[in-house]
Image (tube, grey):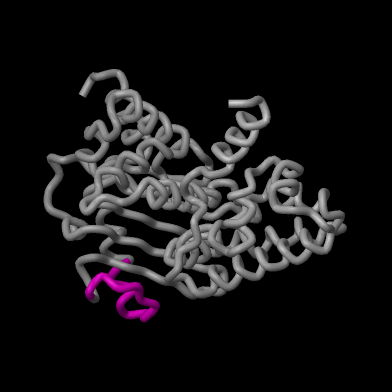
Amino acid sequence: MSVDGEAEQQLRDEADEPGWEVDPDDEWGVAVITTVGRQLKLRREAAGMRAGEFGRAVGYGEDMVYKIESGKRIPRQDFLIAADEVLRAGGLIAATWEDVKKVRYPKKVRELGKLEAEAVEIGVYVCNSISGLLQTPEHARALFRAAQPPYSPNEVERMVAARMARQSIFERDDPAPSISFVLEEAPLQREVGGTMVWRQQLERLLEVGGLHNVTLQVMPTKSDAHPGVDGRIEMLKFAEGTAVGRSDGEFNGRPTSDPKQLRIIELQYGTIRAQALTPRESLVFIEQLLLGET
């Protein structure tokens, strides 16, 4: 292969990473990406550039340029910035990232992420796994890869990226939300992804549990029955006084904002927190897991 051929192959390989496909069932996402792609193509053609020439100028392969322009691929921010400079668009192409990033992730995850981003209080209990808000990329990837029927590699990477994006709630400081988690002991001992990934996950729990606005508690396996044995419980409260909650064991597991139902969910979550180890005891327990002392 010639030097030019090797360079072209490198451009294509680096750009064609999984997780940036357009979900055909996401009508709004399809509309946004199609519109952005069409505008890119019109500007490229107006500048008199062929797709291959344009691709080399922005560091992407010709095939990837066609995919983005046809609305089959979500453009990365660096692509849009480079395209803006090459086509001398005065910031108009780069600005489309504000719309693109809103549809970067699956529709359901976007809706959940929006609620979490607006909540001033977040409470989460998960029975059989570690909350997605607490997972490392490697832990999340191992879980998605274990699913049956299996997800495609592209679907796995898209879901991992979406899950990691939700964790931006830990970076909020205007003001920072009050966040609490209750985790069961058993999932903490399951070496998802292997020993190294497992240890990194425990270290991540200690890191998040040490944040000033986060409370992390562990429910010992030897504890008595509690209201969360049926599954997940979530509670999100907002600044204007409204709230949304969900409990797998109540109301068919559907999200609710009904005050009477929310009181039941809040009572369940409060009872679980009362039965779990204290935050200090919980962090010590996780440290002991890392040291092999449990």
Number of marks in picture: 0
Residue 76 % position (x, y) = 63, 50
Residue 274 seen in render: no
* Residue drawn at the location 21% of the way across and 51% of the way down: 148
Using the image as rendered, state which of residue 159 and residue 35 is in the foreground: 35
Using the image as rendered, state which of residue 268 and residue 142 is in the foreground: 142
Using residue 75 as the reference point, say whether residue 107 is left or right of it: left
The quarter of the rendered structure image containing the N terminus is top right
Q: Which residues are magenta?
A: 252-265
Residue 122 % position (x, y) = 44, 58
Using the image as rendered, state which of residue 260 and residue 16 is in the foreground: 16
Residue 179 % position (x, y) = 46, 52
* Residue drawn at the location 60% of the way across and 68% of the way down: 34
Q: Main secondary structure of the magenta part?
A: helix
Image position of 106 with respect to 26: above or below:
above
Using residue 154 as the reference point, say whether residue 73 is left or right of it: right
Please tell me whether residue 148 belongs to the stretch shown in magenta: no
Please tell me whether residue 263 belongs to the stretch shown in magenta: yes
* Residue drawn at the location 54% of the way across and 68% of the way down: 29
The quarter of the rendered structure image containing the C terminus is top left
Residue 109 % position (x, y) = 44, 61
